[in-house]
Amino acid sequence: MFLAISKIPPDVKIQRHLTSIHIDDWLREDLFHLRWWLLLCLLIFSVYVWWKIVDKTRLAEISLYAALTTIVTLGLVEIGEELILWDYPTDIIPIFPPLTSLNLASLPIIFSLIYQYFGTWSSFLLASLGVAAILCFILEPIMVWGGLYQLLKWKHFYGLPVYTIIAICIRLVLIRIFTTEKSSS
């Protein structure tokens, strides 16, 4: 019985208990309530709009940008929640990843469209910084006001460099990937 676990570690028991509480709260407080529907509609609307305006001739490239942005964003959201920097009181689903429409769809979609439309570094940087400012100083406060986002040990302006650096780093990764691909052919 090499793989048998004779005793469940205490931290796993605590995590199981917290997950159970979180799911119970989600079923009671979030599922099918107005904020939940708002998040779900925002998610569907974001994907629909993105699909309508994405450059289908570059679909794989732009989708890769959006997917990498989603991965990075979900990782940072999980870190922020784990470190109790912020909270998303309403999730579309009650377990990881925290599927809020902002981090699942809106951020990756918005930044992938910046990637699509702003081809030069200077225009990309300006657009990324502008969108980061809109996210930090307009959309995040609206989400706080609407009860969809809660700042605990975080300030809105902290996100400005974070959003911008994410956009830049993912663009650099894609440039590297496609440069390597072209030089290998």
Image: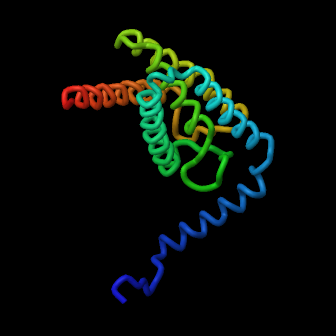
The x, y position of residue 28, in whole percent, is 78, 57
Residue found at the far front of this picture: 185
The number of numbered discs placed on residues in the rendered structure image is 0
**Which of the two residues, 39 or 88, is positioned nearer the viewer here?**
39
Q: Height in image: 27 above or below 184?
A: below
The image quarter containing residue 68 is top left
The x, y position of residue 56, in whole percent, is 51, 23
The image quarter containing residue 156 is top right
The image quarter containing residue 105 is top right
Q: Height in image: 168 above or below 10?
A: above
Q: Quadrant of the C terminus?
A: top left
The x, y position of residue 37, in whole percent, is 76, 40
**Which of the two residues, 84 or 6, is positioned nearer the viewer here?**
6
**Which of the two residues, 70 or 87, is positioned nearer the viewer here?**
70
**Which of the two residues, 50 or 143, is positioned nearer the viewer here?**
50
Q: Is 144 situated left or right of 63 in this image?
A: right
* Residue at x 37% of width, y 82% of height: 3
Residue found at the far right of this picture: 33
Residue 89: tell me if it is visible. yes
The x, y position of residue 118, in whole percent, is 43, 13
Residue 158: tell me if it is visible. no
* Residue at x 49% of width, y 71% of height: 12
Q: Quadrant of the N terminus?
A: bottom left
Q: Height in image: 103 above or below 156?
A: below
